[in-house]
Amino acid sequence: MTTPDTRGPRTGSQILRTALRRNAGAMASGTVLMGLYQAGETAFPIALGLIVEHTMRDRSLGALGLSVAALAVIITTVSFSWRFGMRILQKANTTEAHRWRVRVAACGLQPVARDTGLKSGEVLTIATEDADQTADIIEVVPLLVSSLVAVLIAAVALGMADIGLGVLVIVGTVAVLSVLSVLSRRIGSSTREQQARVARAGAKVADLIAGLRPLHGFGGNHAAFRSYRTVSTEARDQAVTVARANGAYAGAALALNALLATAVTLLAGRLAFDGKISTGELVMAVGLAQFIMEPLKLFSEMPKHVMVARASADRMALVLAAPPVMAPGSGRPAADGGLEVDSVRYGSLRELKFQVAAGEFVAIAAYRQPAAADLMALLSGDVPPGAYEGVVRVGGRETADLSIGALRAHMLVNPSNGEIFAGTLRTNIDPSGTGRMVEAAVEASMLTDVVALHREGLDHSVRDRGANLSGGQRQRLSLARALAADAPVLVLHDPTTAVDAVTEQLIARGIAGLRRGRTTLVITSSPALLDAADRVLVLDGGVITAEDTHRNLLGADEHYRLTVAR
């Protein structure tokens, strides 16, 4: 996987500008068509006024027929311009939303700095809802411009009948937008807070689903539910606050627009009563007063949509601007190189130093789980080079000098709680569909009995997170996936804790046989795996305190014997 492009937009404003610039052509076409739509809508009451004027004056069937034809042209223009204009804008909108979803997902799948305070559930919300709301700016701007066109045409048409009517429309529009812009700022700040709380609720439920089985195991599911309910209630309360602000905004917009339309109608009636405008001009003014409410409503809603898009873009920037945990180099490890940890100090590790030669099978017996967890975090790349002392070398090269893609292609680190995905047994073992060692990996991991249980074999369906599999089956499926990858360097952490002793013995032999000639490191307390290894390193107090074969250590080290013997 390639690293995210750190040269891209890093703030909400830059994200919006990028979206607008990238879709300038589609927005220009959409603006022209939507402008035609609004112009046609505005021309309709103007045409009605002219029809009344000429019909009453000329009383000619020919003039009436010509007027009807003109109305047909206007209606056709309105219909087709709306149809094709919205098609262009919505296509650009959905395409842009897709681009941002992919980009946020790519960054979220990379190891990013942990100072953003975002959990995986929050990143998911940003990659879906916020990406969609940010892309809405593609439609907002053309609709804003087209609404302005309608207001200006109406103002000009009314001004030609009487200058006071045109001035009233322009001044009223400015006043309406001034009032609504103040309300839109409140909506923007409230929306940002709502999006943050909804994202936190999503992250909480994702965490709970991931830990559902252990929660049930010690009876913590009720407390966890109460915790989620509290977070969800906060999100609901903020959503109510946003709804109130939106309601106030919509109500104010409707009232102000209606007030302006009423003022235009009353002024036109007064002018007609005084004989300053004709009957046809009165019809036009009344028609425009009613029509102008739609573009004014659309025009007045634009500030709110812009604030929502800006809030979503700001949240996307939290992910897009987050730097990688490690600044990757561009080097590649040597094909026949092993693994070396040289004088590393991190967490509970103290001057940790060991080496796994190319093709060697080494096991590490960690007396304390925090030390094993710290070592796994170090090898998996979750810890940036600047966060620990010492050096980790893979294939003879320091990990800081390697590209992430090259490092992951060369060394696979498989945790004890490897994720299981919805799909089939086969797609979990070989996600890319190109593996050549699926059958061998199934045998080595002792997954053969799971495959044999089902008529579909490897094509047996697996639910999300392996909900239809037992703990041991999920663990063996995760191990089979790691073995099928056939990585030059493989690191396993407690791959057999959920299986019985007999199966564990068979798995240990299977791993040793399948990985013969390939560099393998297993962090475990399993006697079977320790016995299958070429060497055993004892990790105690953050350092390697002993090194020998499993059987020699059993005979010479009483502490080791008491710790690992079952």
Image (cartoon, rainbow, N blue to C red):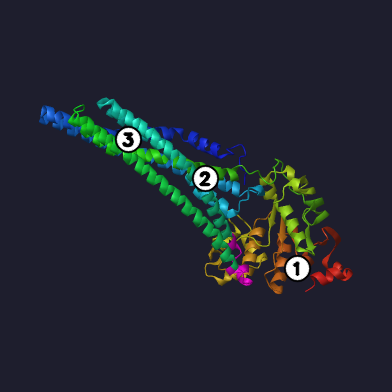
Give the alpha-carbon distance from disc 3 to disc 2, as whole Å.
31 Å
Q: Which residue is mark 3?
A: 38
Instruction: Nearest to the eye among marks 3 and 1: give it.
Output: 3
Q: Is residue 412 left or right of residue 340?
A: left
| C-alpha span from label 1 to label 2 | 55 Å
Q: Is residue 439 left or right of residue 288?
A: right
Hey, what amino acid is under mark 2?
Ser
Taking the spot 34% from the left edge, 40% from the top edge, the residue there is 257
Q: Say whether residue 416 is left or right of residue 258.
A: right
For the residue marked with disc 3, what is the amino acid? Gln
Query: Disc 1 designates what residue?
Result: 526
Residue of label 2:
189
Magenta segment includes 292: no
Q: Nearer the viewer, residue 390 or 49?
A: 49
The three-letter code of the residue at mark 1 reads Ser
First of labels 3, 1 by sequence position: 3
How far is the residue under mark 3 from the one under mark 1? 75 Å
| Position of 510 relative to 302 (above/below) | below
Task: Give the magenta part as a residue range.
Answer: 207-222
What is the crowding at mark 2: few (fewer than 14 residues within 10 Å), some, or many (at least 20)?
some
Q: Residues within 10 Å of mark 1 (few under 14, many from 20)?
A: many
Which quadrant is home to the C terminus? bottom right
